[in-house]
Image (spheres, rainbow, N blue to C red):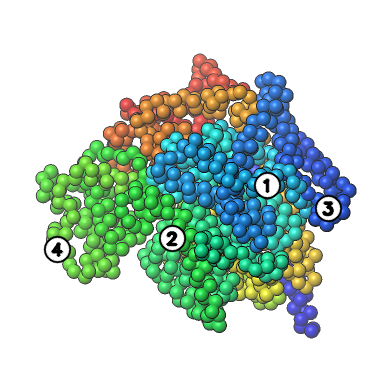
Amino acid sequence: MFESNITGAVNRWIWIVFSIAWFILVLVSYWAFHPYYSVALGQFPNLGIAVVLFLLSGGAWAAMALMPEGQKRKKSGRAINGLTLYGFILFLQLVAFGLYGSKNRLFDSDLGAALAYFLVFNILLHGAVFLVVLIHYSAGNWLMRRLAPWYASDTQKVLSLALGISLSGFVLAWLGLAGLLYGWLLWILAGGLLAWQWRPALGFARDILWKPTLRLPEKRWGAIPVFILLPAVAISNIAAIKLFPIGFDGAALYMNTAHLISDYHALPKGGQAFYWQVFLSLGEMLFGRVPVSILLSHFSVFFCIFALYRLSRLFMGRSASWLVAALFYLNPAVSFHAVVDEKIDLGFLFISLSALLLVLEHAVRLEGKKPAPAGQTLFTLGRWAIQEQVLIWALAGWLAGYAFGIKYTGLIGILALATYAVYRQLGSKAAIGAFALLTGLSFPLGVHKFSYLEVGDTSPWAFAGLGLLIGAPLLVWGSRRQLPSWRPLLARMGWFALFASLIFLPWMAKNLGENQHLSVDALLNGKLEKPILNAVKQRSGEIQYIYQKGMDILHQRGIELDEAQLAKVNDYLKGFEITGTTPDQRREALNKVKFYIYYQVLNDEQRDAMFGGLPLAGGNRAEERERLSPEEEREAMQAAIALSEQNAVRAEVKRYIGYEPGLPLYLSIPYDLTANSTIPFQQYLDITFLFLLFFPMLFFGRNIGKNAVLIIVSLLIWTFSVYSLYALGGQPSDASVQAAIDNLLAMQGGALAPILGGLFRTIQTGFAGLGSALSGIYAWMAGFSFLGVFSALAALATLGYFLLRDRLDVLAAPFKGLLAYIFAFGFLYYILGNAIAWYGFALFSLLMLVFTYFFDKPEKLVGYGLERYARYWMLSGIGLYLLLTVALAFINTTKPKGSEQLLFLSPLLKYASSFQGAEETYASFIPFMGDVIDKLNEDPEARIYRVGTYFNYHIRFNDQRVLEDNQLSLYEQFSSRADDKNEFLRILKNSGVRYVLFDLNTAAIDQTPERSLAKKTQEFFELLVYSNDAQLLYTDNFVEDPAGGQFRMGNSIIYGKPGVFGNSTYHGTYVLYELK
């Protein structure tokens, strides 16, 4: 007893001291890397609007909380109907719109008329979105209602919507393949569906709009998150109304694809599967309005909120569940998707959460948390009756397959659900074994190619072997006494896999039809119809052709070259020249290329696989002895472009995860995700400090030794993460560390900056110094191969399970099932996600649920009488999170420094509040925007070479006309071997390219240590500016004009004249050149 008391006392002090130190460490570091919070809180430029909205919201909360309760309400809680809530949010929107417009003098006419137009415009757009939701609910409800006894009514609504969207997508994809996506046909199908399902459709509308079913939290304080949310929702809903997409990914890809679907009445060729773009295209196909499609993208966040809320309600009351919803919605990375960029990640998240909700709520009811229905629900199909467990897992597979059809990172969710299924049936050891097996076996199937992992010389089968070595014994050991359980598990997983495959059939058919051959890649990726560059010199095409032929032959024999081997081949080709003009001389030169690859690049194992152990006989193995035909030349150039695009994507992905070598690259992911040190000052990557703050505290237990290990490992990982910031170019000096810290702190301001800045300087210099002392260990870890990295991360995951094991004993089985899903998803995201924040939205949202669960039940988190302290410690973190994120909702982080107060885009506000048309909106958005769009669409056959910019969406048939080169990899590939850089422009001209559209801010995205993109950008821009082969047509960059020229853009005046020579008076974003 005495020893137990001492252990408890020591653990108490360890928990308190570490929690305080960790709080300071995380918060100060997070603050330093996010200067926009100094603006949001220190200056609070829209404070007046925020105060009015929160007073109104607080007044509504007080009215609801203090109103007398009837007997019925005392039992079930206060409730309001959806129409009341919607009306109040609309009212807040009108107030915010009026205050902001008056402050910034946006109204040319009567304020009342602008508000009335804005109100009607909102109601019409929202009504269109609600009709789309109603149609899809009706499509899913006919199936979901058969499982009604197993799910709460609100869960049924969420799952009906998810299933309806997936069923609709399946049908629409087949119609798209047939070229039948016409609005009139879709209205006939929708009308028929609503007529067939009129009763449940009417019931859904009544429940959502009129019936008081939206219940407020049980406790009065619990309603606070709801009324914190409302002003933020009002602000976001105003910003979500747009005439055209303004996000880079939305304009270049996601909304662009939806727009093309509407234009073609069919699925565009090429690319990966795009189910969610098919859903978004309904805004245009049904209503002929782009703003409806954009709202469907942004309002997907509400689908996610309701799914996450229902997941939370399985384990918590309404108060805590609403807190989870508020934490999720206010997260900066999530709100960026809800307001700025029109992407598909929120849709992907909704479907992923719905698939988890489908299997998890059923498990919760089976555990007896809620009364199970009498008997089993059966789904009857003719004479066949399917048990509800089989049907549920089949539908989960259908949803998971649909998620995979949105983004191929859906594979992570599929493996996580499979791990959860094994856990439910066979327990934790078998689940870990199954997860290890599935993860290892996914590498030979090419999962590492999805994420552009640099596996080096390691064969994918080595990962399979490691997975087998770890997984098989655990799977056998964990299930040794549960052999009868294998049969139902395999049956469910079989149905799960079958339905996941079925829903992907349209994309298999599309991609195989475009590729005309069978392979894994041909099933997953369509063939693009991009412009092909025709080299002026035939011989460079011959070299590229023979290179690609060699690669194809290697691929057919299952041989994949690693990065070092590819670099060796490319270096050889850079200096290679074909001399002579006779066919024999050409054949001899081309055979040299092949022989070099076969004998100087391939290793012994690859060479044996290539030739079966036999020597290559002279030139008898030459595949191509004839001169290249025009069609072969075209294939060669297509291969060159494909290789260039692959390298560009790899460079794009690499900038998120960072540039450290070996294991430090992955150890620093938690720090990088929190500090956003790889791409600084960007809201779309900001997941906030909450995850790094709370996550280590989950692993504290009753064993002092384990807690000591946790603290040491956490601080070592932090040390190497800080050290890696300054060690990319070698071991940093004290002066270089101080200079980097000074540059970062120069971005900060406010009254607290001197104090927090001093703390940050102490933290960084201290940990950087410790990192220097441990530089030998750092260098050793930096030399790890990817297999070594994978093994080390698996060891860390095992350590985490070892530390967490004691706490798992006190948790309910369904909650442990949720943790099993989170573990599997989290590990795979860590390996495959490249630290891209939105790939991990499912992980982060579920972690918010877990954190709130322990905040609501602190006795599950910590003992020794620290429950009260732990609750207030977590409350401090949550409170600070809410303060920062709410303040952030009232500034615009995408604006340059000094303009953060411009919360909304004035041209789009005017569009939403007046009869302002598209042309006038373009004219006031970007100088000459309308003229550029007209010029690019003047000749629908003219091809365009595009580097960045937001114009892709506005170019008709851009999937066929536009050659995209955002990383300038094509330019580098074709110009690197040319003495005259103008050769590249002549290649473009020779290939039918008429216009060059170039983003002046391309270099800004370059975070590489060598600044390679910045150098290419400068080189290419100088080529354009000084070349006699290109003529400037338009730019929004303005320079000094001795004649005193002016340009009016909306209510603003730009002084100077458009141009690229001279001192800039207005820094532009694009140039449009025409090739002569």
Foreground: disc 1 or disc 3: 1
Mark positioned earlier in the residue sequence (1 or 4): 1
> Residue 150 or 28: which is nearer the viewer?
150
Foreground: disc 1 or disc 4: 1
- Residue 562 in the image: state x and y as whole percent: 35, 60
Any part of residue 675 in sight = no
Mark positioned earlier in the residue sequence (1 or 3): 3
Q: Which residue is mark 2?
A: 447
Residue sitting at x 49%, y 27%: 929
> Residue 59 or 538: which is nearer the viewer?
59
Q: Amino acid at mark 2?
A: Val
Question: How far is mark 3 from mark 4, CA to CA?
Answer: 89 Å
Question: How far is mark 2 from mark 1, CA to CA?
Answer: 44 Å
Q: How many marks?
A: 4
Q: Amino acid at mark 1?
A: Gly
The answer to whether residue 642 is above or below residue 609 is above
Foreground: disc 3 or disc 4: 3
Q: Which residue is mark 4?
A: 617
Foreground: disc 2 or disc 1: 1
Residue sitting at x 42%, y 25%: 935
